[in-house]
Image: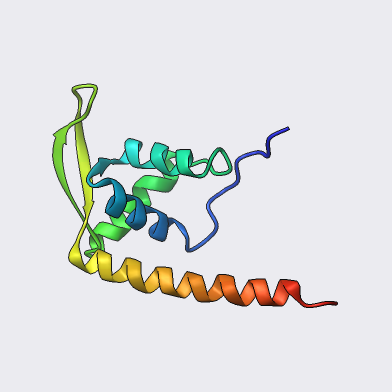
Amino acid sequence: MAPLPSEVPYGTLDLMVLKTLKVMGPLHGYGLARRIEQVAEGSLALNQGTIYPALLRLEQKGWIASEWGTSETNRRARFYSITRAGRRQLAAEADSWARTVALMARLLEEDS
């Protein structure tokens, strides 16, 4: 039996969005959420109440930019792309997460 999708752990959504935009290029919000879910292989569920506030926050910080375009279904959609400042933030956050993961791995390997 497959595990149920979990909520996004606090502090990780920004990193997921920035990384996805860096790899995939400009995406609209729905496409971005579906791509993150696809990479998570069903272990994560994103809804509009999660992804759109994050996109607004990231745009206000200057880490992503948006412009109107036409989706693959011929609907007007806002497409988001990572900015230069977003690339710098992505590098800093990825480094921080790598250190955190390494620390947790060391702690979890210790004998109790």
Judge left or right: residue 40 versus residue 94: right
| Whether residue 98 is situated above or below residue 32 in the rendered picture | below
Judge left or right: residue 18 versus residue 40: left
Quarter placement of the N terminus:
top right
Q: Position of residue 103 (x, y in %)?
A: 61, 77
Q: Nearer the viewer, residue 13 or 53?
A: 13
Judge left or right: residue 78 versus residue 51: left
| Whether residue 46 is situated above or below residue 73 in the rendered picture | below
Q: Among all residues in the image, which is located at the extreme top?
A: 73
Residue at image x 27%, y 71%?
Answer: 88
| Whether residue 15 is situated above or below residue 25 in the rendered picture | below
Residue at image x 22%, y 68%?
Answer: 85
Residue at image x 28%, y 54%?
Answer: 22
Residue at image x 57%, y 48%?
Answer: 7
Q: Among all residues in the image, which is located at the extreme right?
A: 112
Q: Position of residue 75 (x, y in %)?
A: 20, 25
> Which quadrant holds residue 71?
top left
